[in-house]
Image (tube, rainbow, N blue to C red):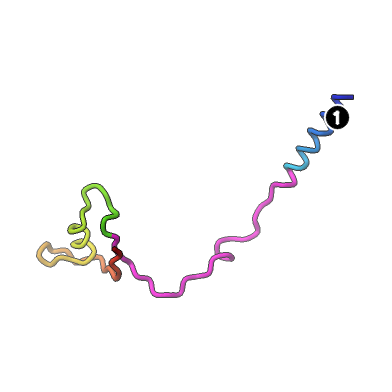
Amino acid sequence: MRNFFLSIITMFICIITIDLQAQVTYTANDQVTPYTGIFRPGMNPGYYGGNWNDLLLTDIVGGNPAAGTEGAGVRAFRS
């Protein structure tokens, strides 16, 4: 009798776990509002580690005619 109840409980748990699994019916395109504002690529000084210091980053993103660097065209400087 005990094995019968254990079998029933095991089957019940298996059925519950099967019913709890679900596939979502939406994507990020359905949930996220598209951004229609102006995109402003920027630089975050002090964030980059290693050999990247702030002076080197400003030469890369803003340009340095003395070094022959055109610049990446940053529109925002986030301190």
Residue 62 picture location, percent across and down:
21, 67
Please state if 62 lies on the left or on the right of 47 as rendered. Answer: left
- How many numbered discs, if any? 1
Q: Is-magenta flag for residue 27?
A: yes
Q: What's the amino acid at mark 1?
A: Phe
Residue at x 47% of width, y 71% of height: 35
Q: Which residue is mark 1?
A: 5
Residue at x 26% of width, y 49% of height: 49
Residue at x 26% of width, y 59% of height: 45
**SS assignment for the magenta stretch, majority:** loop
Please state if 24 lies on the left or on the right of 53 as rendered. Answer: right
Residue 16 picture location, percent across and down:
76, 42
Please state if 79 lies on the left or on the right of 68 as rendered. Answer: right
Near mark 1 (Cα within 10 A), the count class, few <14, some 14-19 or many ≥20, is: few
Quadrant where the N terminus sits is: top right
Residue 50 picture location, percent across and down:
24, 47
Which of 70 and 16 lies nearest the eye of the viewer?
16
Q: Is-magenta flag for residue 70?
A: no
Residue at x 65% of width, y 59% of height: 25
Residue 48 picture location, percent across and down:
28, 53
Rendered position, 11 above or below 20? above
Q: Tell me which segment is drawn in magenta.
A: 18-44
Which of 78 and 58 lies nearest the eye of the viewer?
78
Name the quadrant containing residue 69: bottom left
Quadrant where the C terminus sits is: bottom left
Name the quadrant containing residue 10: top right
Please state if 39 lies on the left or on the right of 10 as rendered. Answer: left
